[in-house]
Image (cartoon, rainbow, N blue to C red):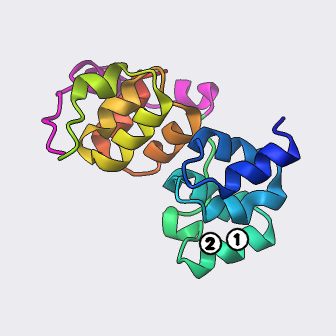
Amino acid sequence: MVDYDAAVAAVQDPNADPILLAKIAYENPEFGANVAVNPRCYPGLKRWIAEFGDDRARETLAQYGFTAEAFGGPVQDQEAPAQAAQQPAAKQAQQPAAQAAFEEPVATNPYGFTAEQALTTTDQMQIAQIAQYAPELRACIARNPNTYPALIEWLGQLGDPAINAALASRQ
């Protein structure tokens, strides 16, 4: 658990670790509004705070135009394995084909991020930066086994077929 003094320092730090901010928001809901306005608070964390944060945090985000509805509605639970087993056979047959053929995207971002970096980096900050500044590489980030859970959740909410196929291949 993040102690109070460390949480206070982190939410005030414009260079705070986004993962630490997520942990603070989860463990200390009273810091939700402070986490939400930190420049390192990523969209998925803002969405989570907009849905699960306390009233003050939700009001703060609403002032900036961020609501759970603005990010695609409430968070939905993933299909349970038992439900997946009940899917029609044709749908199940389509899934492996989609998973098997990944087309490597062409990196077009001005920051120099590459598909190789997106697929292999273990640096959580770099993963967050690639997701933010190189949207063409988000499917690669979704395939990277080192991508942190909050970012995986956010990627799943984008509704991009390539990202969804990459996320399905993780399971």
- Residue at which label 2 appears: 61
- Circles 1 and 2, Cβ within 8 Å, touching? The answer is yes
Relative to residue 133, is residue 151 drawn left or right?
right
Instruction: Tell me the residue at 73%/60% (across/down).
Output: 32
Query: Residue 43: percent from the left, percent from the top?
Result: 50, 56
Name, please, the residue furthest toward the right.
Answer: 4
Query: Compared to 71, does 59 lie above or below?
Result: below
Q: Is residue 13 visible?
A: yes
Q: Is residue 55 magenta?
A: no
Query: Residue 24: percent from the left, percent from the top?
Result: 75, 46
Instruction: Tell me the residue at 56%/63% (across/down).
Output: 73
Magenta region, residue range = 80-109
Closer to the camera in the image, 167 or 152: 152
Query: Residue 134: percent from the left, percent from the top?
Result: 27, 44
Closer to the camera in the image, 168 or 122: 122
Amino acid residing under circle 2: Leu
Query: Compared to 162, does 49 lie above or below?
Result: below
- Residue at which label 1 appears: 58
Q: Quadrant of residue 12?
A: bottom right
